[in-house]
Image (tube, helix red, strand yellow):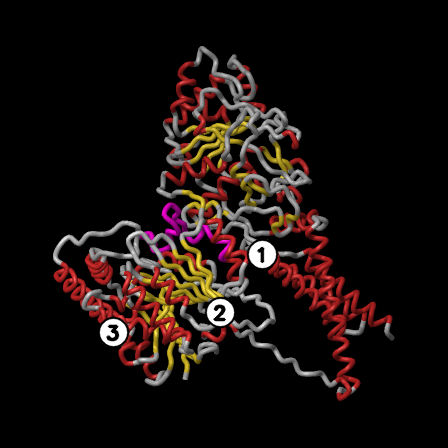
Amino acid sequence: MQKLVVLNLDGDLNQGVKVTLEIGAEGDRASIEVQGYLTPKPEIIADYKLWRTTYRSLANFRLTPVSINVGSSLNEHLNNCRKLNNKLSQQMNSWLNCNSFRPLKEKLLKQLTLNDTVRVLIKTSDTWLRRLPWHLWDFFEDYSQAEVALSAPEYEYLPKSKTDIIKGKVKILAILGNSQGILIEKDRNLLEMLPDAETTFLVEPQRSQLNEQLWEQDWDILFFAGHSSSLEDGKSGNIFINETDCLTIYELKYALKKAVSKGLQLAILNSCDGLGLAHQLEDLHIPQIIVMREPVQDLVAQEFLKNFLKKFSSGESMYLAVRESREKLHGIEDQYPCAVCLPIICQNPAAVPPAWKDFFINPQIETSKLQVNKYRTPVQFWWRSVQVVLLSSLIITGLVMGVRSLGLLQPSELKAFDQMMGLRWEEKPDSRFLIITIDEADIQYQNRMKMNMRWSLSDQALAQLLKKLDQYQPRSIGLDIYRDFPVDSNNADLANRLQKDKRLFAVCKVSAPLDGAPEGTPPAPEIPEQRLSFSDFVADDNDVARRQLLHLTPPLTSPCAAEYAFSLQIALDYLEAKGIKSYINPEGNLQIGNVVFKQLKSHTSGYQQVDASGYQVLVNYRSLSYPQNIAQQVSLRDVLNDRINSELVELLKGRIILIGVIAPTTTDYWKTPYSAKVVPNQKLIPGVFVQAHMISQILSAVLDHRPLLWWWPTWVEGLWVWGWSLLGGILAWYIRSPLRLGVAGMIMLLSLSSICFGIFTQAGWIPLIPAALALMATQVAVVFRDVRNR
């Protein structure tokens, strides 16, 4: 009997591992699930590192195009390598026999017989757990029909889209890369001798050639032989496709995804150190991957390939073909120690391992003929009604999603967004901020003190303010005020302060001819470029700031050349002091620490055909009765006159201080999603408070795990809308009374709104207006057809 055993490992060797054991028949859901625990065992890592160092001192690997010299006698190295491998085996089995894991092992042995064919999947994301030679577990000594594979905890299966034509050949794309110092001609000969196979060889290809082949042809198997290596983190690697080009898997990302969608099922990397490469291939959802765990010598790679292809093409299952071919390597371990440890399968759990015949036989689906004449009239009526409901729901869903994609539903969806934003429960102000405000009274105060006013904040007042702030020891000071003029010549100390104080950040405005601001605003001359940022906001058609612009490329003619937003620069400065870094992840999104800031696209939930230039994210405003209550505030004159509460002074150390103008005469006022619910004279709030919300969003997401706004992919939104459309059609077909149907429709709309709002409280923005339209429209369509046919 065929069985599937899954070990979900959550943890690592240093802290311990939570284990979930799943056992079931192949192709069925797991019938048994048991929880357990593996105790910390960091000694295994130390033993593995020692074994690996000794093993890698051997020569002639397919690792890099550079030979490796043996530092001492060969026999000494071989014997030492074997001893260390035996020690590693003992440590692993001691670990896997600990008391907290023994009940799982006993349950496993109880559910299997010695004749069962067993696939064992090790699902983990921990690099060291993936590196372990799991075949050394004594379980596999007793079960000769069992083999182990690695699997990622998160996976997705992309179904192949093959034609209905029965193929006569297995299509293989074989890449023969850089062969300096190694012999890969034998690999080619083995592939050429395969029965019922059509192999296309790319010998030291250019990247463009490889990319074209993956895009244009349908492949069953992808093969690589040559030099390769993985990075130390075990999550990425390189293949050397020719003498000059070294590629990562992600550099072939879209071509490989296309190949998977067209039927690619198996990737064989008969090259060195493939676990990092396998990790990247798993991310692309390639169903089956065979790699070498560590560097591999020519003869080992060729022997494994020869035996595997022979067994697999003759009809043996892929797992057993790998096991038998791997164990056959034991015969050459007198010269090549630990060869049996090298081959490993990496498996997408959602895919079924193929047999050789599955590659070139595409089973035809037999459909039984419907004998309509044997149906009775009620059945015919029922079937016609089902057809009406299904067809109506599909047509209306298509129409609604089409109208939505044109942006015609965007105004109503954004209003619904604002309503849900305003209904969320109250949050506390962000205690990491202090906002120093400049109102009309502060401007008049400066005039009374005969300060040289050139706008809202004089040089004298700014110099005094910065000097006062020194005693509070803030972490960052953000000056959200344009200063497109130099410091007065009488204030040399201020100019020096602006130039050298690394805590101080200032703003300028990027020119935007299409948005009515063709000139922009230059930056303060004294502040270095690295502490300058743009203050530009992105407002929707109704002047509401719902989006946060983090990065843009200024026009060449713009007087403000800053590429990063004021809010982002302040937040990153605060986080870097805590040792938290930012970078662009492989998907192209900004990641700060462990938090990914998903970029807004032109079609994102309620936004359709919106200008998404630059790097934009949705703003998850802090939920407050009045958005200007985002943080504690003091006026400029109170700071200058030392009228700050003593308790507040104690709390200011390490805070972010924002300085901004809130006088009504300024043009820096904005609407927010909360503007719809507040009193008329508070619908607009000063820009410094919006900046505080945006900075708070970044800090809260990274430090407090406050969720960022998220949304579904378009296809999931389409299924969601279709589900509600279908529900509306079923209600209309089942409930014939107009009054009852109306009541049922209202209940469904209330349920839909409640579900959408409930998900919105968890930061999810899912379609409300399109689903409501589809629900009601399908009801009307089904009722109309029913009335017409009476």
Foreground: 456 or 161?
161
Task: Give the mark nearer the N terminus: 2 vs 1.
Answer: 2
Q: Position of residue 56 (x, y in %)?
A: 23, 56
Q: Which residue is mark 3?
A: 97
Q: Which residue is mark 2?
A: 170
Cα gap from disc 1 to disc 3, whole angstroms: 45 Å
Q: Mark 1 belongs to which amino acid?
A: Pro
Quadrant of the snapshot with the N terminus = bottom left
Q: Mark 2 belongs to which amino acid?
A: Val
Near mark 2 (Cα within 10 A), the count class, few <14, some 14-19 or many ≥20, is many
Near mark 1 (Cα within 10 A), the count class, few <14, some 14-19 or many ≥20, is few
Nearest to the eye among marks 2 and 1: give it. Answer: 2
Task: Give the mark nearer the N terminus: 1 vs 3.
Answer: 3
Q: Position of residue 2 (x, y in %)?
A: 41, 81
Foreground: 383 or 467?
383
Foreground: 166 or 481?
166
Q: Position of residue 790 (x, y in %)?
A: 87, 75
Q: Is 591 on the left-hand or right-hand side of 325?
A: right
Q: Mark 3 belongs to which amino acid?
A: Asn
Q: Which residue is mark 1?
A: 713
Q: Is residue 250 magenta?
A: yes
Disc number for residue 41: none
Q: Which residues are magenta?
A: 228-256
**Label pair 1/3, CB-CB below 8 angstroms:** no
Residue 94, picture quadrant: bottom left
Q: Position of residue 100 (x, y in %)?
A: 28, 72
- Asked if residue 20 shows in the view, the reply is no
